[in-house]
Image (cartoon, rainbow, N blue to C red):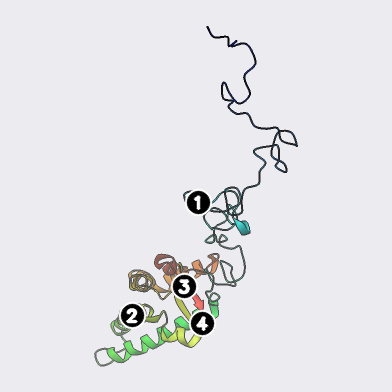
């Protein structure tokens, strides 16, 4: 029979193995110099919690330089954020500046009006020269024909010139040009012809002087881009070239 007593002390180095037993450490049971809080260990540089890359290419914590997780700048702000019209620095959405950053200031009313008069007189002179061999300007039919011809010529003249570089001869002389409101570029062909048609066709169908007065006064009271009705229709704006 065995004389081993299971309730007796285990022999040194034998018997059941000990699991999870470690020799006592100085400093409260943790390795010397390590904090007792297992969650207080600072993350390694560039690791999680330090703004470094995560396991899937993202970032943890705050990105350096106050940037958000997508490189947009401080949270809640995007590099494409722009102040609303009428607010912000000069040169953007203000009466004295262009509608978009980098665009020149808006064209002044005296320059715009004189530019229109120059263009109209030039086109009217051509119309008179073309109609003189066939009718007298002293007759009602001759003067009406001259006006109708001038309107047709002006429609073509305005549409072609604005679609080319945003300037007619009158606008070149007065140092203003027509630009797309959204980006300041030269008007598209559709915008150029829409602008010319809205300026001319109602004048032909109704009272020319009354329509041009309404169209012009609309731009005087329009804020902040001083757009006349024909500018609203074409989504254009008149800016200075100086």
Quadrant of res 197: bottom left
Say which residue appears at 56% left-offset and 59% top-offset.
84
User: In this picture, is 89 found above or below 54?
Assistant: below
Quadrant of res 129: bottom left
Quadrant of res 19: top right
Mark 1, other Cα within 10 Å: few <14 / some 14–19 / many ≥20: few
Pointer 1 residue: 58
Q: Quadrant of the C terminus?
A: bottom right
Secondary element at tag 2: helix
Q: Nearer the viewer, residue 137 or 70?
A: 70
Residue at mark 2 to residue at mark 3: CA–CA distance? 18 Å
Say which residue appears at 56% left-offset and 21% top-offset.
16
Q: Position of residue 27 (x, y in %)?
A: 75, 37
Secondary element at tag 4: loop
Residue 119 seen in render: yes
Q: Nearer the viewer, residue 70 or 113?
A: 70
Pointer 4 residue: 241
């Amino acid at each position: 029979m065995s004389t081993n007593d299971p309730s007796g002390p285990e022999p040194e180095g034998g018997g059941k193995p000990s699991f999870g037993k470690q020799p006592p450490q100085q400093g409260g049971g943790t390795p010397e110099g390590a904090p007792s809080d297992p969650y207080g260990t600072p993350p390694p540089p560039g690791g999680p919690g330090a703004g470094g890359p995560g396991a899937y290419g993202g970032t943890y914590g705050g990105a350096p330089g106050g940037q958000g997780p997508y490189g947009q700048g401080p949270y809640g702000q995007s590099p494409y954020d722009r102040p609303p019209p009428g607010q912000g620095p000069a040169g953007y959405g203000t009466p004295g500046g262009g509608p978009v950053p980098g665009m020149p200031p808006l064209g002044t009313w005296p320059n715009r009006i004189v530019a229109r008069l120059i263009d109209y007189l030039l086109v009217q002179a051509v119309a008179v020269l073309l109609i003189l061999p066939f009718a007298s300007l002293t007759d009602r039919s001759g003067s009406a024909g001259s006006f109708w011809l001038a309107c047709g010529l002006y429609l073509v003249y305005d549409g072609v010139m604005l679609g080319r570089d945003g300037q007619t001869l009158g606008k070149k002389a007065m140092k203003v040009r027509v630009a797309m409101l959204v980006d300041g570029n030269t008007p598209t062909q559709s915008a150029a012809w829409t602008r010319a048609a809205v300026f001319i066709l109602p004048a032909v169908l109704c009272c020319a002087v009354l329509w041009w007065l309404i169209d012009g006064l609309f731009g005087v009271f329009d804020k902040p881009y001083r757009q006349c009705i024909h500018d609203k229709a074409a989504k254009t704006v008149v800016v200075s070239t100086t």
